[in-house]
Structures are given as structure tokens and as C-alpha cells.
Image (spheres, rainbow, N blue to C red):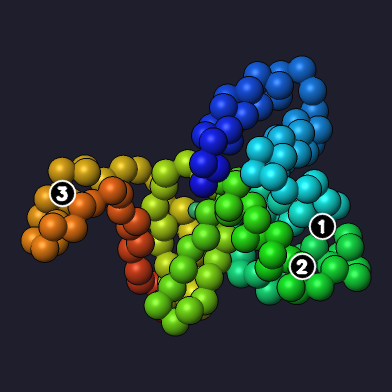
Amino acid sequence: MCVTGECERLESRDIVERNTTTYATSAEQRLREALEASGQRFTEQRSAVYRHLASTDTHPTADEVFIAVRATIPDISLATVYKALETLVGCGLATKLTYGDGSARYDGRTDPHHHARCLECGAVIDVAGEVDARALAAVEPRNGFRIEGFRLEVVGRCVDCAH
Ligand code: ZN
Ligand code: MN
């Protein structure tokens, strides 16, 4: 997240701007300002990665983003895509979902929400609704660990994999 809290401020301004300018212009402006606030440069590569992430709810892997972005920037490398994704995460414009096997998926949504993951095909979808935070007391570690939040992932079989 942005240490300056700049991203949150930009987010609310973005909503106002959407009324007067096109979404694309506003999204690019938001990217420019968030990058600048984190001391990062705006690049076409970063912009393309951001646009793709903002346009999908499939929680793509870096490889999947690479394949999609190559359609508009043919000479982009996987390493550049990976670094762009990490930069977006670093300035609060994306979130990273990590898994026990070391794999990762990226999410253009940064508001609090939960996920469902298919054990068969690996698909990750957004889940609507909230969990009562008081339920955390039941799983609070006893060794002085201070809970600051939680990530909920329900697992099972997606509609295509549930035979
Ligand atoms: Zn599935
Ligand atoms: Mn999500």
C-alpha cells in the first residue's frame, strides 16, 4: 500500500472525475498520480498491465496477464509484466493473492472482498457478502499474535467442474 495514503485520496477524486471525463482518461490519470506518489514512472507497459487488470475479474496469473498484454505490446517481456504487476500492488492499485504452492494471482479490485477457489481447475472468483468479524475471536492465536485483518477463501468445485 502507499505509505502516504495518497491512493485512497485519489480514489475518491476519481469517482468525481468519472462524471466529467471518460473512464479511460480518468483511470490513466489515477495510475499516473498513484505511480508518481510512490516515486515510480508512468510507462505504456505499466498502463497496459493496469488496463488489463482493471478490465477483468478472473484474477489472472502473471503469465495470463503477459499473454493478454502481448496482444497490444508484442515486444513486452514476462519479466516486465511481472515487475509492472508488483509495482501496481506496491502503490495500492492491485492486490496479490498468494498460494501455498508459491503461485500468485493478481486482482484489480482493491476494496475488501472474499474469494472462492476451485480445487479442480484453480479458477478464483469474487464472493459477495461479508463475514462477521467477531467470528475472528474463535480463531485468534494465543501466543500474543495481534490480528490486523483476515483473508477468507472458500474452496470447492466451480460450476464447470462440479460433475
Ligand atoms: Zn473449476
Ligand atoms: Mn477479487
Q: Is residue 27 above or below residue 16?
A: below
The amino acid type of the residue labelled 2 equals: Thr
The reply to whether dot 2 and dot 3 touch (C-beta < 8 Å) is: no
Q: Position of residue 157 (x, y in %)?
A: 40, 72
Q: Is residue 43 above or below residue 159?
A: above
Q: Which residue is mark 3?
A: 135
Crowd class of label 1 (few under 14; some 14 to 19; many from 20; radius 10 Å): some
Q: Position of residue 45 (x, y in %)?
A: 82, 57
The amino acid type of the residue labelled 3 equals: Ala
Compare marks 2 and 3 and give the one earlier in the sequence: 2
Crowd class of label 3 (few under 14; some 14 to 19; many from 20; radius 10 Å): few
Residue 141 image-quadrant placement: bottom left
Q: Which residue is mark 1?
A: 45
Identify the secondary structure beneath mark 2.
helix
Q: Position of residue 152 (x, y in %)?
A: 33, 57
x 11%, y 63%: residue: 143
Of badges 1 and 3, nearer the viewer stands 1
For this view, does 122 lie left or right of residue 131?
A: right
The reply to whether dot 1 and dot 2 touch (C-beta < 8 Å) is: yes
